[in-house]
Amino acid sequence: MPRVLHTTARSPYARKVRIALLEKGLPFELATVDLTSPTADFLARSPLGKVPLLVDEDGTVVFDSTVMVEYLEDRYPAPSFLGGSSFSERLLHRELDELGDTIADQGVAAFLAKGRDDAAGEGRAVALAGRAATEIERRLADGRWPAAFGVGQAAVVSGLGYFEIRHGRALLDRHPALAAWAAKQAERPSVASTTPHA
Ligand SMILES: N[C@@H](CCC(=O)N[C@@H](CS)C(=O)NCC(=O)O)C(=O)O
């Protein structure tokens, strides 16, 4: 059966996995989930009721984008998307993955806070996203950066892309070196073809 990634249109976590699948050359189909009324079939397979959810060709079900990338790396190791056999490169990818996911998480949190007129909550979320962006920018400057494109860079472009469509360019404008780096990533087909639209 075909490999299927269950997602919503703008999920930054699913985008990270889509980039991984594209970079590894693994064919897949997308199935769109309506999180306001998910099907019984989706809920039966997704332990937390969240997207993304990956169902591999042999029926293996994997939840959580970071776990998915680790699963894909274990099962389909070449080309590597997680730093190959170098522990230091793998650590850089994992840390960058967490920083990129933090921008996505706080983009979601700020969006939900705005929806309930919680200005303080929105401010806290935007501030934490800014902290993550500052750390990523510091790493770009001091060279603590994975040599090869992989999950770290994919998480950062996905987090930033989601944040921008929800909250505009203010975060990028405050981090110009990171914004320039992100713009350059769009030269990769896997990044360009998964860019979300507002
Ligand atoms: N850590 C998870 C986060 C996934 C997540 O938060 N997904 C959101 C949408 S982007 C979701 O499905 N929310 C549904 C809900 O909370 O009911 C991952 O990386 O896959």
Image (cartoon, grey):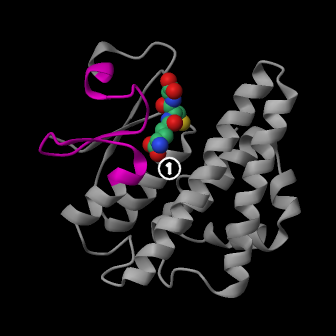
Residue 145 sits in quarter: bottom right
Give how far across and how far down residue 92 sits, in percent: 50, 75
Asked if 101 appears above or below 154 in the picture, the reply is: above
- At a point 85% along the width and 31% down the height, the residue shown is 120
Pick the residue in front: 128 or 115.
Answer: 128
> Image check: 194 left or right of 39?
right
- Asked whether the viewer can see residue 26, the reply is no
Q: How many numbered dots are placed on residues in this image?
A: 1
Residue 6 sits in quarter: top left
Asked if 4 appears above or below 142 in the picture, the reply is: above
> Image check: 111 left or right of 147?
right
Is residue 90 a member of the stretch shown in magenta? no
- Asked whether the viewer can see residue 157, the reply is yes
Give how far across and how far down residue 48 sits, in percent: 38, 28
> Image check: 7 left or right of 176?
left
Give how far across and how far down residue 176 sits, in percent: 84, 69
Instruction: Give, as a single range, the part of the protein colored magenta.
Output: 42-68
- In which quadrant of the rendered image does the N terminus lie? top left
Is residue 48 a member of the stretch shown in magenta? yes
- At a point 26% along the width and 20% down the height, the residue shown is 44
Give how far across and how far down residue 177 sits, in percent: 79, 74
> Image check: 169 left or right of 101?
right
Residue 110 sits in quarter: top right
- In which quadrant of the rendered image does the C terminus lie? top right
Residue lying furthest left in this view? 58
What amino acid is at disc 1?
Answer: Arg
Asked if 46 appears above or below 126 in the picture, the reply is: above
Name the residue beneath numbered marker 1: 15
Determine whether the residue tagged by mark 1 lies in a helix, strand or loop.
helix
The crowding category of the residue bearing disc 1, from other C-alpha atoms within 10 Å (few below 14, some 14 to 19, many at least 20), is many
Pick the residue in front: 162 or 198.
Answer: 162
